[in-house]
Image (spheres, rainbow, N blue to C red):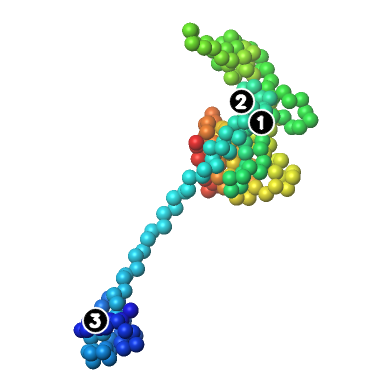
Amino acid sequence: MLYCSRCGCEDQDKLSFSEDIPALYNVFGNSCQACNYSGVVKEMIKPQMSYVQLDIPKVNKYDGTLLKTAYIFAELSSCNRLKVGAVIAKDGRPLVTGYNGTISGLDNCCEEETGGECKECGGSGYFETPGVMSWDCDDCAGTGREMRTSDFVVHAEQNAIFYAAKHGIATEGCDIYVTHAPCSQCAKAIASAGIKRVIFSKKYRDSDGVEFLKKCGLIVEIK
């Protein structure tokens, strides 16, 4: 916008300004026809402000619900030592669910006895706090016998990814919600499936899987 610095005229038809002159702040131009004054001023141009774009992740409002859903599906597992659930979602919408167990159609026995007493509970089958509570030992599922997970148990993350592959459900760019941190084998499957974000709430006995996912550039969050 132009205005005359002498008479204050703002009638653009009566003001002329040379665009050849760089217009940074107050720049004088040609003339004002109202008062024949050559002190026409072009309105100050405010310098452009530069802003640094910060990559701050938005809080995903679906995280809590989808993680709870993973826990609900974990209850379907027949494994006694540890029940794990997983949900693969895209834009907050669940696509595939899974939980740890044997392949469909096989005997759903997830643990095997290795002989001897459970080292964790000393063969009692449970832990007890005098006067407070008692609960089954997770390692032996309350049997008192030393147990190990069968090599043929499919993990929750694998179950979900395998189901998606079998039924043609795309997992590229999806999020996966798991009750427990992925092991190294599941981490490889997750990265290979194109999943971009992993959310879990409980740590695994080692962090190899989590470190591998981070190395592959995936977003890993514990809630």
**Residue 52 at x, y percent in the picture:** 38, 58
Is 37 above or below relative to 62? below
What residue type is disc 1 on?
Answer: Asn
Is 12 above or below relative to 171? below
- Reading the image, the residue beneath label 2 is 82
Determine contact: label 3, label 2, CB under 8 Å.
no
Examine the rendering and report whether any part of residue 206 can be seen: no
Of marks 3 and 2, which one's residue comes earlier in the chain? 3
SS for callout 2: loop
Is 174 above or below relative to 136? below
SS for callout 3: loop
Of marks 3 and 1, which one's residue comes earlier in the chain? 3
What residue type is disc 2 on?
Answer: Leu
Q: CA distance from mark 3 to mark 1?
A: 80 Å
Is 201 above or below relative to 59? above
Determine contact: label 2, label 1, CB under 8 Å.
yes
Residue 8 is tagged as: 3
**Residue 157 at x, y percent in the picture:** 63, 37
What residue type is disc 3 on?
Answer: Gly
Crowdedness near tag 3: few (<14), some (14–19) or many (≥20) residues, C-alpha within 10 Å: some
Examine the rendering and report whether any part of residue 180 can be seen: yes
Q: State the residue in front, 5 or 19.
A: 5
Residue 100 is tagged as: 1
Q: Residue at x 68, y 37 (%)?
A: 159
